[in-house]
Amino acid sequence: MRSENEPVGQEGRSFIETARRAQIVACAIEVIAEVGYAQASLALIAKRAGISKGVISYHFKGKDELIQQVVDEAFTLGDAFTRPRVEAQTTAAAMLGAYIESTVEFYRTHRAHMIALSDIWSAFRHTDGRPRLDMSANEPEVSSVEEILRFGQLAGEFREFSTRVMAVTVKQAVDGVFIQLAAHPDLDFDAYARELVTTFDIATRKER
Amino acid sequence: MRSENEPVGQEGRSFIETARRAQIVACAIEVIAEVGYAQASLALIAKRAGISKGVISYHFKGKDELIQQVVDEAFTLGDAFTRPRVEAQTTAAAMLGAYIESTVEFYRTHRAHMIALSDIWSAFRHTDGRPRLDMSANEPEVSSVEEILRFGQLAGEFREFSTRVMAVTVKQAVDGVFIQLAAHPDLDFDAYARELVTTFDIATRKER
DNA sequence: CTATTTTTTGACCATGCGGTCAGAAAATGA
DNA sequence: TCATTTTCTGACCGCATGGTCAAAAAATAG
């Protein structure tokens, strides 16, 4: 039996183990996105994968580890997508714009991941009821936005404002795409992103 | 047995029934806010109220009706608080500011309600897994913001932008208070609200 | 081919859930 | 006071869940 988070000892994971874990995580994302975390039982995920329920327990310590993998994958993919696009910019305004546009773009191309993530966010709890994912899980992303904002103020590009409040607001604005997405599946992501970029450009810049 | 949503026939609800329903709803809000919707069993809610579990089934058709009552109360209270404050304003800018400030103020004074509501929002599902509260439940509030924005554009106060995107962004910005709230329980709501008011004033106004 | 290890199966378990119900207790009314 | 209705209790039910396990099957190695 494997099922450790880190492959122990010399050997890594077997080929089968790696493939199964990836398959199970992928199926978990699909199922959670479709029926919600609360309804996404191990039995249902196993059925989707065409395997027996016990296989999940064999490859993962428990449901918790599986869900954590789903979360990790979403964050890792998202960061890998947006970070280089932001870092390619030179001005703070361009960085902020790139952050907004690339994040929205990521949401568009990874709907299932993000729907699953947002559902897990509020439903994934410790046994005593405390949330497993709270504000601190969001912190890195908010902080990276805040960094851009501070840089902009220092460089004289941006006016004075609370970088904290503005960072949270930007993050929330980008997340707001979902609200529209649920109601209008054919939402024009590009147009939406452009509106946001313009709005926050105006809201942050110094010029009068 | 009562347990209809509307009191049927001539008679309304008895004194006891009214009091019990209110008590149970209040306890449900507390428990959900503390341990989350998923952990908030009827048994736990009953225990909090100091009554037997069967009493809840006696006064409510089922858990669904109870949760719906919680949701209704939160919306009703919120609307009753913000609406008059917005309608007291004359300019669109003032209305938008009043909306932001009064909503944040409501959140501050009704933390348990709002925490419970946001948790229910994502966990409250039909038996087949479809969300019971989707974007459409938020629509009235977003629409009322959109109305303010359209009025501002018509009156020449506001620049051109998608009223839809801006309305959703404002709503999300206000909701963002929670993210801070979880990490900083001693958050300065007033300062936060003032930052938002300034930001969206700049983001929407026409003057150059 | 045979022996050993890895992987999978499907039945099984304990737990906690929402909901039900017969009967006790309390309130009400004549 | 006594009869009737309302309200409440606590045991109980069926069900779905996450998790376990002995044994079968498949892969791997000698």
Image (cartoon, coloured by chain):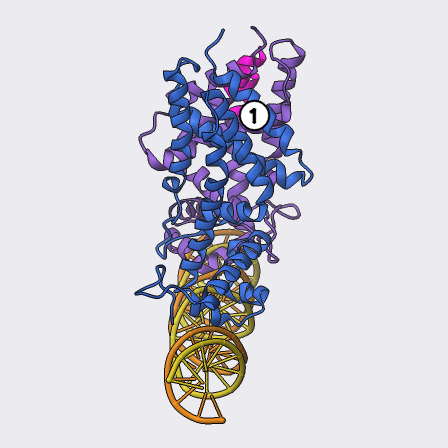
Chain colours: A blue, B purple, C orange, D yellow
Tell me, yes or no, if residue B19 can be seen here: no
Q: Position of residue B173 (x, y in %)?
A: 49, 28
Provide the residue designation for mark 1. A196
Chain bearing mark 1: A
B58 falls in the magenta region: no
| Quarter of the figure that contains the N terminus of chain B | bottom right
Q: Position of residue B163 (x, y in %)?
A: 63, 23
| Quarter of the figure that contains the C terminus of chain B | top right
Q: Nearer the viewer, residue B25 or A197?
A: A197
Q: Nearer the viewer, residue A64 or B177?
A: A64
Q: Position of residue A172 (x, y in %)?
A: 49, 32
- The residue located at (60%, 58%) in the rendering is B127
In the orientation shown, which residue stands out farthest toward the right?
A: A186
Callout 1, which amino acid? Answer: Leu
Decide: is B161 above or below A174: above
Q: Nearer the viewer, residue B191 or A67?
A: A67
Please tell me in which quadrant of the rendered image residue A58 appears.
bottom left
User: Badge 1: how crowded within 10 Å, few (<14), some, or many (20+)?
Assistant: many
> From the viewer's perspective, is B200 left or right of D29?
right
- The residue located at (53%, 72%) in the rendering is A52
Decide: is B159 above or below B112: above
Decide: is A34 above or below B102: below
Tell me, yes or no, if residue A204 can be seen here: yes
B84 falls in the magenta region: yes
- The residue located at (39%, 27%) in the rendering is A146
- The rendered magenta stretch, by its main secondary structure, is classed as helix
> From the viewer's perspective, is B158 left or right of D2?
right
Question: What is the magenta range?
Answer: B82-98
